[in-house]
Image (tube, rainbow, N blue to C red):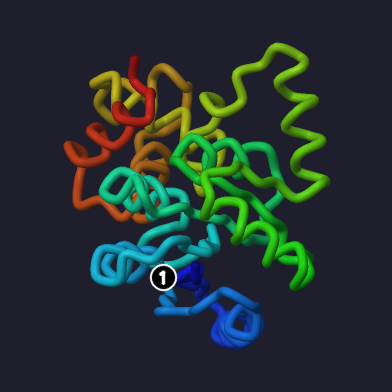
Amino acid sequence: MTVRVLVVDDHPLYREGLVTAISTMAGKEVVGEAADGAEAVRLAAELVPDVVVMDLHMPVLNGVDATRQVTTDHPSIAVLVLTMLENDESVFAAVRAGARGYLLKGADRAEIGRALDGVSHGEVVFSAAIATRVLSYFAAGRSGPELAPFPELTDREREILDLVARGLTNAAIARQLVVSDKTVRNHVSNVFAKLHVAGRAEAVARARDAGLGQ
């Protein structure tokens, strides 16, 4: 059976090279390519590929949120993350969003090919370095996937989003964090921009869906 693949990456040269590499693999067919997360969601619905190869750091809609939407709307589609981001927050956020695989961009053709086969058959696939860290993390009794929703946010921005989701006003947040109202407003604006939300209500809904504001 041919594995149908949608390639998602905002860097044209890397995406082109990846499309070429996957197209030459036995039993693989690239059915589409996207340059941002929103386009990925749209094409996943239109093309229904077996696997979406997803970068994480992208414009319009980031890869974690795109992964969540694709896997929620189309449980049969496997998402294989292929990214330069190797921090724990990014790994666990992607897994929590529904990704079945996580490779770093240093992966060679053979590793990518094996991962495509694996996730398309329901397996969970990590690159060796990531797998070692994930196993160590859980062996230490930590709940990794719950740790860091919205990896694109800084720790301070995530803290402020949590307080927004708890219903605090900017002024109340400023008093609690002992910072100026203007500082809070700037952070809130940055959060809205990074999450691509239109306003406070949408940000609160997204935050609560991700477990913040409890």
Image point (76%, 28%), residue name = 135
Q: Quadrant of residue 182?
A: top left
Q: Nearer the viewer, residue 24 or 94?
A: 24
Percent position of residue 41, x then y: 31, 62
Query: Which amino acid, by three-letter code, is at mark 1?
Result: Asp
Percent position of residue 108, x then y: 79, 70
Percent position of residue 38, x then y: 32, 65
The C terminus sits in image quarter: top left
Q: Nearer the viewer, residue 102 or 78?
A: 78
Image point (76%, 39%), residue name = 131
Q: Is residue 26 above or below residue 128?
A: below
Lateral position of residue 55 relative to residue 207, left or right? right
Q: Quadrant of residue 209?
A: top left
Image point (64%, 60%), residue name = 83
Lateral position of residue 102 relative to residue 176, left or right? right
Reading the image, the residue beneath label 1 is 36
